[in-house]
Image (cartoon, helix red, strand yellow):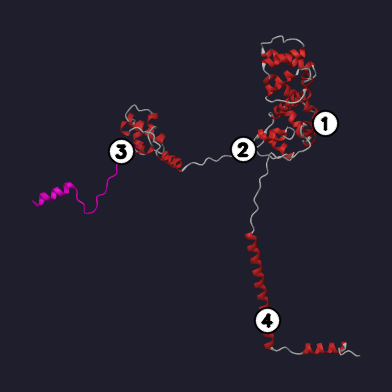
Amino acid sequence: MVSSRPSRKAATKATAQIKKKPVTKKAATKNAKTVKASKTTKRQTTKKVTTKKSSEKKQRPKKEKVEKDPTAVVIADVEDNLEMLFKNHVSKELLVELLQCNNVKVLSQFKKDNVVAKLMETTMARGQQVVVDDKLSKKTLNAFIAEVKGSEAAHPNNKGELRKELRQLIEAANGFDEAVKKLKVETIDAICEDLGFKEDGDRKDKVEGLTDETRLLGAKALFDRVQYRYMQDLCEKCGLSKKGQKEHLVARFLGQSYRFLLDDAKVPPKEKKEKSEKGKKKEKKEKKEKPKAETPDVSKIQQGVSDLELHQYYTAQLQQYLKDNELKKGKNKKEMVKIIQSFLNGDESVLQKNQVPKTNKKRKRGAETEDNAANKKQKTA
């Protein structure tokens, strides 16, 4: 069957006829109004939508800032290993600077491994110095020397001589750790007690614990010689917090290998002491009731007074004194003191310059003097 749809030519003719039809003025105005109305409705709808979004944003709750614990452990592969901490997490430049601050010569041509080895050697030597010179008692020094030397000390009662002899024995034994291996368990326990800790386990564990503690004391001694800014840079490059004082930063860095130090790295919160209302009122009263300095009496200014005594008066008092004595007011206190001294001593050359000239007061029109009034009375009589 043939479809009732018109042909393509017929459709094009019909559209051409529609285009040719003229549009009247009424139809044009109606079309313009409908277009404006549609635009305004679109604007209103968009405004409402935007206001809703803005109100939704305002109603959203703010996220609470959670402060990170500055003592949180960041470096996990260096526990009980100070050498790995220096080697893997500290730059060569910072290691060289640390040694140079402690007067240890290091060439810039050295490789990082050589610098780390030098640093570990220095920490052990400095720790040995701290233990021998500052920590050990006289009894422990005697026991240490007797067991390493095989005989009693040369000067058992002189602590300075004991330290000197022990240093020589440690140097002959190729280091502190080698000398400790010759000691008995009781002597090692005594040394640990002098250092302020107790090591459990067998003899080998106690020797390792003592050498570690000695190395830690040496590292602390090295960091005591650096500045606060250096410790901030060191912690920042290791990914640690920079908050706190220098001692907190040192404990935070060394705490990566010695975890018990992290308790010392915590920064205590600042306590704000709020004053009570009574305390505030008392302070205000004290400020108001502060006694003024007693000034001398102006009437006591006499011949023979010194310049220092005159300077004790207020400026206003000296000005009033000059005014009462018909003298000019000086520009400053020093000049006023000079005028007063010349006045008291009778220096006429200065007085003539600074004397206030007497002015003749003009008589007002219609005013009578006493003599004129008396003459008039006589005439009338």
Q: Is residue 76 visible?
A: yes
Which residue type does callout 2 highlight? Pro
Mark 2 against mark 3, which lies toward the viewer?
A: 2
Kindly identify the residue that appears in the image at 71 percent across and 23 percent down: 192
Residue 349: x percent and y percent?
Answer: 35, 32
The secondary structure type at the circle numbered 1 is helix
Whether label 2 touches label 3, CB < 8 Å: no
In the rendered image, residue 22 lying in the magenta stretch gets the answer no
Residue 362: x percent and y percent?
Answer: 26, 49
Mark 2 against mark 1, which lies toward the viewer?
A: 2
Kindly identify the residue that appears in the image at 73 percent across and 22 percent down: 128
Mark 3 against mark 1, which lies toward the viewer?
A: 1
- Closest to the observer: 224 or 372? 224
Q: Which label number is shown at residue 113?
A: 1
Which residue type does callout 1 highlight? Asp
Q: Which is more N-terminal, label 4 or label 3?
A: 4
Q: Which is more N-terminal, label 4 or label 2?
A: 4
Q: Which is more N-terminal, label 3 or label 2?
A: 2
Q: CA distance from mark 3 to mark 4?
A: 97 Å
Q: Which residue is mark 4?
A: 34
Q: Where are the magenta residues, as a range?
A: 354-381
